[in-house]
Image (cartoon, grey):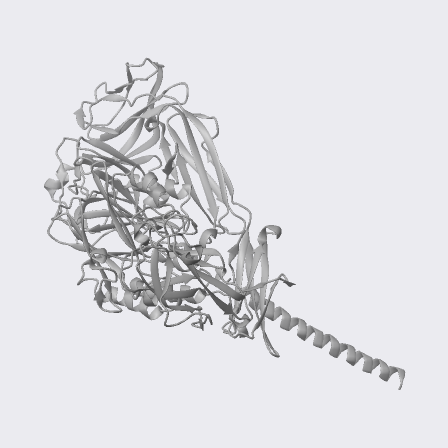
Amino acid sequence: MKKEARFNFLQKIVLVSFSALALIGLLWIIRWVAIDKVGIPQALANDATFTLSMDNGDIVRGAKGIIATGSKPETKLSLLIDEVPMPTKPVMQLRAMLTFEADGMKSGDGFKNSIWVNDKLAYTFDQNLTGYTKMSVPINADLLQLGNNKITIRAGTKKSPDDQEGEHDLWKFRALKFELGDRTVLDDPNYKTATIYTVGSPAGTAQNAAAFQKEFNYVIKEDKYRSAFYLWDTDKLPEGSHKVELIAEEGTSKKAKTIIVQVDNTAPVLEIISPVEGRTYKNRIVVNVKSVDAISGDSSMVAKLDGKVLELPAELQTAELQVGTHKLEVTTSDKAGNETNKAVSFQVLNEMPELPIQPAPADRSTVSTTNLSLSVQVNDSTKDPLEVSFYKARRYDLNGSVNHEALIHAVDREPPLVLVPEGETAMTTEQRALVATRDQQYLVNDNKEKFPYHRFTFEIGNDPLTDSEVVWTGHSLPDRLVTMYIWNFETLVWEDADSNRGTEDFTLKGRIKPASMVRNGKVEVLVQDRIPKPDEYDFAFLWMSDTQYYSESFPKIYDLMTKWTVDNWKEKKFNYMIHTGDIVNNWNSKTEWENASKSMKTLDDANIPYGIVAGNHDVAYDLGNYEEYWKYFGRDRYVKQPTFGGDLNNNRDHYDLVSVKGHDFVIVYLGWVIDQKTFDWADGILKKYADRNAILATHEYLKPNHSYFGQGRWVYERLVEPNPNVFMVLGGHNPGVAYNIKKTGERTVLELLSNYQNGPEGGQGFMRFLQFDVENKRLLVNTYSPYLKKYNFFKSEEDEFILPLNLKPIEKRVATDYIGIYSRTNELIGKVAKVPSGQTATIPYSVQPGQTYPWYAIARDDFGGLSRSEVWTFTAN
């Protein structure tokens, strides 16, 4: 071959090779772009060959359990993290069920009868059984093992489930069945179907250890372990993105699913900018806290001032704080659950000058322009000499002005959800005059069932309102809270500006933030309190709990429960629904979460107000992993509900404000594993809404034997006892029902347990009706299954009863004497130095006849303390 031809031939080979490599490279780039955007290759996005307990974009920290499940027993699963194979172990994901019929059991009398699995305690009974009664005992998958499994049914003493001495219970059982989560029924070759077995010993007879228990053995084969488990220790990895890949092999077929997750083991950076550690403050303290998280990007904060929850952002008036040392504590947590805590201490001194008083000319007076002067009297608590400055101002109120709107109305909540609710009525000339000046002439607005308010639109034109506040004066009835709101045009909500209570006149002041509270030269203000009175109408709350087996195995029952709720909402006089947790059975089952979310969406679509809280099965048991709960039942799902009050850590804990027929409730939901932060937050909410009837909804509280369970005692001691507005506590978790009527001083607290999960088909759709008969002071409790279309699962006296009810007094009032806006400028009229405390400061003032002049004064000491007077006006003739 010629040299030139050989060269051209080799050149073509090289070009083809480079083209092939380029094409392969391009295909890999396209593949990883797809993974980067959606987490898995596009062609495999909906593959049903396997499931993975993590999703693309998840944020993880610490020890993270990963479960992968194949669709067939022969599916071989491999897990790779950052291209490195991980050592997984086979597990069963679904719990099993042991069922039998029992007679003569006296667990309700204190005997600790129990079920043991592979020598570990799996279940303790808590009720008496007379006549053969079917019992269903869930067996968690983590108690079972590959190969032989020993299940022991044991009669206990009143001391413990495994006590070998003392008097044991004596009871019988039959019809024993052990069923795996995939509905496979396993057999013990030594079990005799027609036999009635007895455990325990009669009282007074010799104690025979062999008689205390009966053992049965079940073999679980390898094909039942379709899931692979790996405990991923992310603490040893760098922060940021990591690739998790699951490979499923069935014969010669191999498929893969790849996701990108973020590892975040670094707590947010927390900075308390103000107040400064050790500094002494006078007048005003702006609480300025900054939290930044590099991975999660968002974090939630809880602040406490002297042990009490403080809502951020906040501005503290030192005049309202005790003299001495104060402590600000702040906790911030990111989406992964990492926390940072910081605290600062600061001092408050009592050196504030008192407000300038006794203005001359007198407010709203008419004076001659000849030799006109302005004067005020000033005082200082430490008798320091004061510098007194006089400034120009503006005042906007209804005195002589027709530019400002004033309206009256009543709505079904506080505050309204919109700026202008339908049905408002303009105040008459006589009504406007009542609120135009401070003269102890009041505009009083009452309503029997809805929440009345006074709303004002102030025209301020081009006034920049650089230093301005809304001022309201009036009063209410004993212990009633009056709140003043200013409309925030950016967040589109009525923002709480100030509140107070009492029958004597008090003043509310709300700072105006011009950037968010002024639009088109207008400021919107609303003053509201609730004034309903008792009436004859009943209303009801609906309560469901422990829907875990519906989500896992019986989703049609769950669907039926929520659909029935919507269809019967008005007829049954329901006004709110409560769910006390264990929404799903397996926290890492995407199918279960989707089933539960779909069922509850029926309520969302019908605008049914409800609250929900996580149980232990929703958050990886003792791990407290809220990742899956947040995906389906986080804050975003509920924030627009009209009853949603607020939350802690993305709806981990939250509270709802419910008002029905003139009765106001705050329902506080406490998530699984209540830590000190939650207790502090909940206590703050209960005190903030001390005028509302409070219900606590948590997952665990009572046992069927009426005693406290888990954190129940803590909930009672830390939240129920210290807060006199709490009248009811609801909980599930423990299968069964119970209630207590507890007296705390003069107060009656109702404690209720409701959980039907151990019934056939996960509880057969039974749920509770809490019906309020206010006039007769009764709570009527009923239990109903829309699935079976029947009342009562347990005995009628356990599922249908009447409890005493004594809701807090609900007479309320808002009585307005005056409202206006004080707009203070920096235009100095004049000032006087070294004015002795208790003396009068005077300056000359040149004015024009026929004009009205607003003004105010500031008294300053030599240490930075100052006080500003009200805004006064006079007219020159």
Along the line of sight, which residue is nearer the eye, 386 or 717? 717
Pick the quarter of the image with the N terminus: bottom right
Query: Which residue is more in the foreground, 726 or 690?
Result: 726
Q: Position of residue 446 (x, y in %)?
A: 13, 44
> Which image quadrant: the C terminus?
top left
View extreme (right): residue: 2
At x 41%, y 58%, the residue is 211
Q: Position of residue 412 (x, y in %)?
A: 20, 51
Instruction: In the rendered view, tell whether residue 379 sits above or below residue 540.
Output: above
Residue 97 quadrant: bottom left
Q: Is residue 684 visible?
A: no
Question: Residue 244: horizontal and vertical position, in percent?
Answer: 58, 63
x and y, in percent, of residue 720 in the image: 29, 41
Residue 352 shows in the view: yes
Total labels drawn: 0
Quarter location, residue 736:
bottom left
262 vs 716, nearest the viewer: 716
749 to 22, vertically: above or below = above
* In this picture, residue 34 sits left or right of residue 350: right
